[in-house]
Image (cartoon, helix red, strand yellow):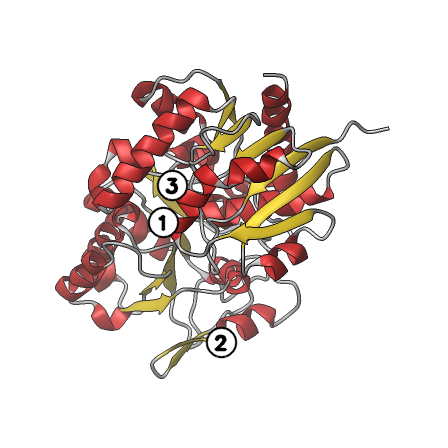
Amino acid sequence: MVDRLHLSLDVTAVPTNPVGAGQYTLQLTRVLDQRPDVELLVVARRRDGSRWRAVAPGSGVVTVAPELRPLRLAWEQIRLPVLLKHQTVEVHHGPHYTMPEHSKVPAVVTIHDLSFFEAPQWHERSKVLLFQRAIRVAARRAAVVVCPSQATADELARWCRVDGDVVVAHHGVDLDRFRPVESAPGSDAALLSELEIGSTRVRGSGGAGAGGGAGRLGDGTPFLVFVGTLEPRKDVPTLVHAFARVAGRHPEARLVLAGGAGWGASQVEEAVAASGMRSRIIRTGYVKDDIIPALFRAAVAVVYPALYEGFGLPALEAMACGAPLITSSGSAMEEVTGDSATLVPPGDVVALSEALDGALAGDGPDAERRRRGLDIAARHTWAASASKHMEAYRLAARS
């Protein structure tokens, strides 16, 4: 008989439209629910039960947390320890930096990145103060800290005293969604037709694995794509300036910025206005999950020039789609992608413009480099990530 570990998982920080850390929590919940060695209790917000029961139909779901963040953080410290005390929970996982500080249940906490220490100017001051404290508390009091990359684990040790164990668990990629070939002929075109920009519709043309037409809008226009929240550390302004430097040599090319506006997104709008390329830079806003793989397959290249990431999930997802990838050197993305991506120094507009120029000129990765990217993505499954998390949970249970 399988020894089932009784685990509670706090999903209260996951927004309605999850990206980044929210997707991580969503996918981890889904996979843990399917494991025979876990008895999972999902702790959700009061009006969020139906979503989590659909994600984890084999698990218990309690909908007790308040909706508003300040109330939710207070509830985590005051009421969650009482809830855990009355459940048969052996380990509690806080997947978004925080933990109930006075609970007797051993805690595992995920620290996604150290940007609140490394570059606090990228965040609102209130969040900096909140998460700097939360990270220090987790480093001292959690039985185990999970980091999504070795780069993050190294930064945690540099900034904080870490008293518990540290487990590096890379994120995974949903290989059913992110794949090099569209699910059926014309399915990418149908999905991308939903992205209306003024009178223009973005449409796929067969995808990277279908041959011909990849990297073009519906009217045959080649395009580069960035997918992610528009916030300072993604360094989208540098991408805009780099595109403007090479746009004259590629008069048909477009830059598609796909993602919702985060804190500091006004810098992107200022960069677009200053670039003189407003008519050739397409802003889609938030893009639904099922459209992103189609965008990746249709692009000349996926560009993810972030100054800093704890992992950089869009880079892995792009590789899983077989898309040429341009991303930042000396980063967690390089740790994951290795030489399967075109790497440029973060913030270097000249180097980035040269990479964009090469991609638009057709100097993309050869078949071997693309194969290496697909192999890397194939190893980074959410099942593999969940197995590393189980190591963390077992360590915590023994603490």
Three-letter code, disc 2: Ser
Viewer can see residue 371 = no
Q: How many marks?
A: 3
Instruction: Say whether disc 2 or disc 1 marks the residue closer to the N-terminus.
Output: 1
Q: Is residue 300 above or below residue 92?
A: below
- Residue at the image position 56 percent from the left and 67 percent from the top: 206
- Residue at the image position 56 percent from the left and 62 percent from the top: 211
Local SS, label 1: helix
| Apparent side of residue 278 relative to residue 168 in the rendered image (left or right) | left
Dot 1: within a 10 Å radius of its alpha carbon, few (fewer than 14), some, or many (20 or more) residues?
Answer: few
Instruction: Say whether disc 2 or disc 3 marks the residue closer to the N-terminus.
Output: 2
Q: CA distance from mark 2 to mark 1?
A: 39 Å
Residue 342 image label: 3
Q: CA distance from mark 2 to mark 3?
A: 29 Å
Q: Nearer the viewer, mark 2 or mark 1?
A: 1
Image quadrant holding the N terminus, namely top right
Residue 193 image label: 2
